Amino acid sequence: MAFEITDEFLENLIGLIYKNDDTAIKVLFEEVHFADIAEVLDEVNFDEAIYIIKLLDSEKTSEILTELDEDTREKILENLSAKEIADEVGEMDSDDAADIIGELSEERQERVIDALEDDELAADIKELLSYEDNTAGALMAKELVKVYETWTVAGCMRRIRGQAKEVTRVHSIYVVDKQDKLVGRLSLKDLIIAKAEQKIAEISKTKVDAVNVNENDEEVAKIMAKYDLEAIPVVDDNNVLLGRITIDDIVDVLKEEADKDYQMAAGLTQDVDSDDSIFELTKARLPWLFLGLVGGVGAFIIMEGFHDIFSKYGTLFFFTPLIAAMAGNVGVQSSAIIVQGLANDDVKGSIYGRLLKEMLLAALNGVILALFLFIFVWIYKGEVNLSLAISVSLVVVIIIAGLIGTFVPLFLHKRGIDPAIATGPFITTSNDIFGILIYFMIAKMILGI
Amino acid sequence: MAFEITDEFLENLIGLIYKNDDTAIKVLFEEVHFADIAEVLDEVNFDEAIYIIKLLDSEKTSEILTELDEDTREKILENLSAKEIADEVGEMDSDDAADIIGELSEERQERVIDALEDDELAADIKELLSYEDNTAGALMAKELVKVYETWTVAGCMRRIRGQAKEVTRVHSIYVVDKQDKLVGRLSLKDLIIAKAEQKIAEISKTKVDAVNVNENDEEVAKIMAKYDLEAIPVVDDNNVLLGRITIDDIVDVLKEEADKDYQMAAGLTQDVDSDDSIFELTKARLPWLFLGLVGGVGAFIIMEGFHDIFSKYGTLFFFTPLIAAMAGNVGVQSSAIIVQGLANDDVKGSIYGRLLKEMLLAALNGVILALFLFIFVWIYKGEVNLSLAISVSLVVVIIIAGLIGTFVPLFLHKRGIDPAIATGPFITTSNDIFGILIYFMIAKMILGI
């Protein structure tokens, strides 16, 4: 379990590589899990990684490739021949194989698939590549254990001994009719507990959850999480069994989804990690920053519009960062709660109900905060009117910020747009502008200027 | 699969409840998955929910209870007698049972456990309740299939027929020695493929991943995700097999973790959903908002400190919201990338390297944005010095904001504090203040005031 990549380990490894001590290297990796070897490859330099990949036998390296971080894998695959890749891929489950081949250029895909010895796998991969990204079809594996409803338990046991060899994990045995339509499922457990002469139809559960091959993968993830499924069969429109999706793929989908939302909330326009190139990172960060700049210019223009009260009530201007910050924070809080609620399917009831609730909530928060502000300004400045103007407008700003933060994601969701884009900079920026505008308008009113 | 809670369905159901037409209600729920029934219970009013729970047989309702949203479950359990709860819990796996009993008050826990008919389950639940929250022990289930290394395949098959009945899903069969120490594992598949007379020791894999009972659950989640495990055995310090954790529990851990980080980034201090009470929501939202208020007051004091340049360069003050916004956005972006990198364990190399990279990155972004700002102010105001002062300080502010956003989470992480708290309002607020301070200082320098 507790394998740690120590500097000693790396030094030792690299030393062996330069001594070309292949046997020692093999021994070194003997007991190491492929997921850990993948991490090692991310650590060592590129030639060393290639050396290791070419050295270890493809049964192990195929697993490693699937675990590698995408950039590293891409570089490595570029340095392998179509034949070499085919050997690696030949050891993989169809879904992993398809994913990796899918990362190659069109014409390399051709050559690798042609180079595959196992024609059935080649056909499976071609099929899997044919499905659109982010669908059940693109996620599923073709490997599964399938039996016919007419078989007996004994016969079934004999037959699946063959099939099971190719399937890494047998979650369910799927029962089909002669047209290969899914009619039920049973677990190995059921099979073991049953009597040898029983018919499959007798012991199989006929109520079997399945997803359509064109279903969106995030939807599949929701379904599997909700119903605690560890594998789900994938069928076409005629309910013909095409493949199955296992929970470990879903774990990845969930993680990606969460990362995506988190990054959107942070104002990153694409999936980046801290190790990406500065150019990549700039591409991801600049767009929202630019929006922020435009927003700031908007705020500038608004404030300039009020410059006439500048001489008399300059203090008002010193509070604009506070107003903007509060508007932004409140907006982000409200939108985050809605976005998360939508993601977990627990936003029910009418929009108006929500807005009303948010209004009360924001008002409550606003009044509490404004009270502190009022006292501070009063003590600090000794001007009741000014304190009143600032505090009252703070309350209004907070309420409106909350309403915007609640409404926008709900609106986007209704329009079929991912509400997550409404979090972070988008809300912050728009709230900055609205906030400052409202602030000065109300302050002016109260101060009677 | 596609069960939708329609208004018709609800009306119909509620109608039947008031007619006390129990048989019809049972028929109505016949084909409905318990996870869907749980959602129905969240929809109907409280008495109706109780009515349904008491009506359906505990085999079904026990499943429903585990799926229910915590608040609803709490209310329902309050209205069930210790005996009734014991009947529900008696149908559950030990981990779900322990979770639900754990939600009860100390003395109710006692009474429910005493009321359990199954003494073994009672003992298991007591044990599970004894482990600390968020440890492998608190997450695991006691149900598993265990065989002794000395058994033969045939004998093993016979024995596990018994054990398997109690285990919902058999992922792995765990092999132990006479002291119950974990020595290996095999899958049902291996068992089916093997020959009847073979010894378990011959066909079992001796390299078996396991986690210690005191391991943190997020760590367990990482391990299972990394190694694509669907179940992992839990052992004590002497490697004695205590239980197992299955992937569906891990899916929940991952979701909770992601939600938590997301909420922290949005400035929510505790897990809330949009349906919580206004009081709950205020408790979650007010703390960070208050921090924002304090930050805003800080910004006010800084700006007032510069009020002497007010008459001459009032325009500078109109740009403070822009400066603050940019500082905040940059800081949040940098910290989010680091926080996510830390969560996925792919932040490697030295802190200084990271900070240097962030500096270059921020400088690049900053210069591009400052260029636009410079041109705008120049055209709009026609004052080169002013434009220069504002743009140059924007660049510096962005660089420093980026550095803060990068450094703080790394620092917290090194100190063993969850870096996620460094995202959102925390970074935004501190960057607002620093940003504005730096902005005026540099502007003053350049304008030679």
Image: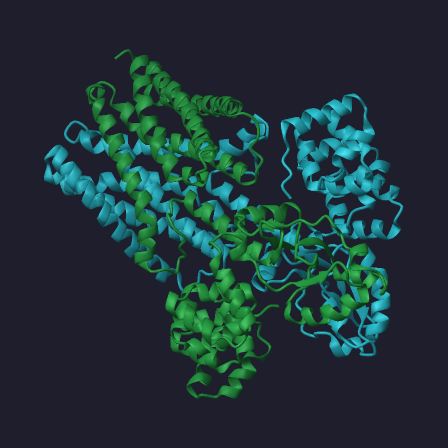
Chain colours: A cyan, B green
Q: Which picture quadrant has residue A205? A: bottom right
Residue A315 falls left or right of residue B319: left
Q: Nearer the viewer, residue A266 or A248?
A: A248
- Looking at the rendered image, the quarter that the N terminus of chain A falls into is top right
**Where residue B296 sits: x, y (%)?**
27, 35
Residue B87 falls left or right of residue B47: right
Q: Nearer the viewer, residue A376 or B63?
A: B63
**Where residue A78 sits: x, y (%)?**
77, 31
Q: Nearer the viewer, residue B389 or B344?
A: B344
The answer to whether B263 is drawn above or below residue B203 in the figure is above
Looking at the image, the residue that sits furthest to the top is: B448
The answer to whether B50 is drawn above or below residue B444 in the figure is below
Task: Tell me the residue at 49%/56% (across/down).
Answer: B131
The answer to whether B378 is drawn above or below residue A69 in the figure is above
Task: Tell me the residue at 83%/68% (across/down).
Answer: A157
Residue B163 in sight here? yes
Residue A62 falls left or right of residue A216: right
- Looking at the rendered image, the quarter that the C terminus of chain A falls into is top left
**Where residue A66 sits: x, y (%)?**
72, 42
**Where residue B133 sits: x, y (%)?**
47, 54
Task: Tell me the residue at 64%/45% (across/down).
Answer: B226
Task: Tell me the residue at 33%/49% (across/down).
Answer: B285
